[in-house]
Image: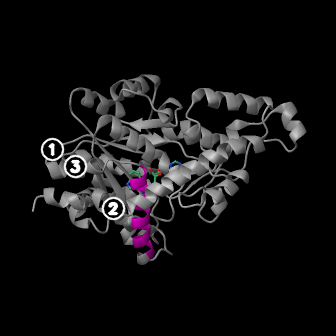
Amino acid sequence: MTNEDDMLVTPWEVKGTIDYDRLIEEFGTERIDEKLRKKIEKIAGESHILLDRELFFSHRDLDWVMKEYEKGNKFILYTGRGPSGDVHIGHLVPWMFTKWMQDCFKVPLYFQLTNDEKFWFDQDMTYEQVHELTRDNALDVIATGFDPEKTFILDDIKHIDLMYELAVKVAKKVTFSTARAVFGFENSMNIGGIFYPSMQAVPAFLHSWIHERKTPCIIPCAIDQDPYWRITRDVAEKLGYYKPASIQNKFVPGLQEGGKMSSSDPMSAIYTTDSPKKAKKKVLAAFTGGRTTAKEQRELGANPEICSVFKYYTFIFMPDDKELADIRMKCVSGDILCGACKQILVPRMMEFLEKHQAAREEAKERLHEFSADKLRNLVRK
Ligand code: TYM
């Protein structure tokens, strides 16, 4: 997906200025409108800032799943992570929202760790690295606070016995030409990568397969994963399952100018493993919408729309709408300078990381509680 501004949104790369309206149109998803937002809020019994602030903005079939839920037909949740390195704050956004949905709707969550994907798609990744990162990233998943009774962390390589029957069924229904059209595969792609989209489809059907009952599925994720859902939805009914629904979020931008989080520039993202001190340094060095001089900023105000610090407030760190509106007003009117504004984010970020890191430590003893190992007892022999 490219345009004149070189916007690129694929499951592997996101760059340029993201035009979300255009993504909805070109991906063929639907906007989450006021009516649907209100419906979710009514059924969930409360609202969520990521919905209210339209940071979850796009969906497929979510209205249908909500209607089914009202009729008593419960859904399952499915989300995931490709363990390619440390987890950053942006990755946590769909997970926090997924946790909220699990808490409100009391439904199972299938969480896929796609170590096969990262091994096949990153030429430099060794098997040992991807194995280690799978365990390490699982700690972040658990630290998000999911319900162990209702959460099944699938490690693609370790749990292939649970997943392979469905993967081969999906793979038979997807031609190479479809996969190439959707993902842009080139001849140099290894054959593991070409097979991989069938693995990412599996958790959408796994509950239905295990329990031998068609069950609706909602996938919360950023919109970059949508190509996978096109393939998954294409094959669903052919295999006797419902098409999975999805609810899609916008991207938390990088901290440097250009808005991209890049693993080659560690200052561009805050990782959950960063020490609070290191995170503080990153926030203080972040790109903002400020003017070149303090005098100019006091006179003309700054631009929160392009400011990474303001984005961090909007996504996670300023849940109070009044406080957010207030800081926005002070920013555009020049009443607050960027240094002072960053000083508000710093302690919030540090506290967030301290809490998350303590939960990560505890998670080391709890991996088995969340593992999809427990599904093995339920699977037909
Ligand atoms: P991965 O590891 O690239 O990303 C994990 C999740 O984070 C979302 N995401 C972001 N959200 C907000 N701001 C950002 N800057 C940002 N960057 C990434 C992604 O959309 C994703 O939801 N192939 C997948 C792994 C996967 C998966 C899934 C993801 C397997 N099954 C089901 C979502 C749902 C991947 O590599 O995600």
Disc number lying in front (3 or 2): 2
Vertical position of residue 120 compared to residue 21: above or below: below
**Residue bearing the label numbered 3:** 207
> Toward the viewer: 374 or 291?
374
Disc 1 marks a residue whose amino acid type is Arg
Image point (55%, 48%), residue name: 352
**Residue bearing the label numbered 2:** 367
Query: Any magenta on residue 196?
Result: no
Quarter holding residue 336: top right
Q: CA distance from mark 3 to mark 2?
A: 21 Å
Label 1: element kind: loop
Q: Please rate how many residues cluster around mark 3, counting C-alpha atoms within 10 Å: few if below 14, some from 14 to 19, many from 20.
A: many
Label 3: element kind: helix
Label 2: element kind: helix
Disc 3 marks a residue whose amino acid type is His
Q: CA distance from mark 1 to mark 2?
A: 28 Å
- Label 2 CB sits under 8 Å from any ligand 1 atom: no
List x then y, in percent, for residue 268: 65, 57
**Residue bearing the label numbered 1:** 213
Question: Could you tell whether 274 is left or right of 45 in the image?
Answer: right
Question: Could you tell whether 28 is left or right of 63 in the image?
Answer: right
> Toward the viewer: 87 or 164?
87
Q: Which residues are the magenta region?
A: 129-144
Q: Colour scheme of this structure image?
A: one colour
Image point (65%, 60%), residue name: 278
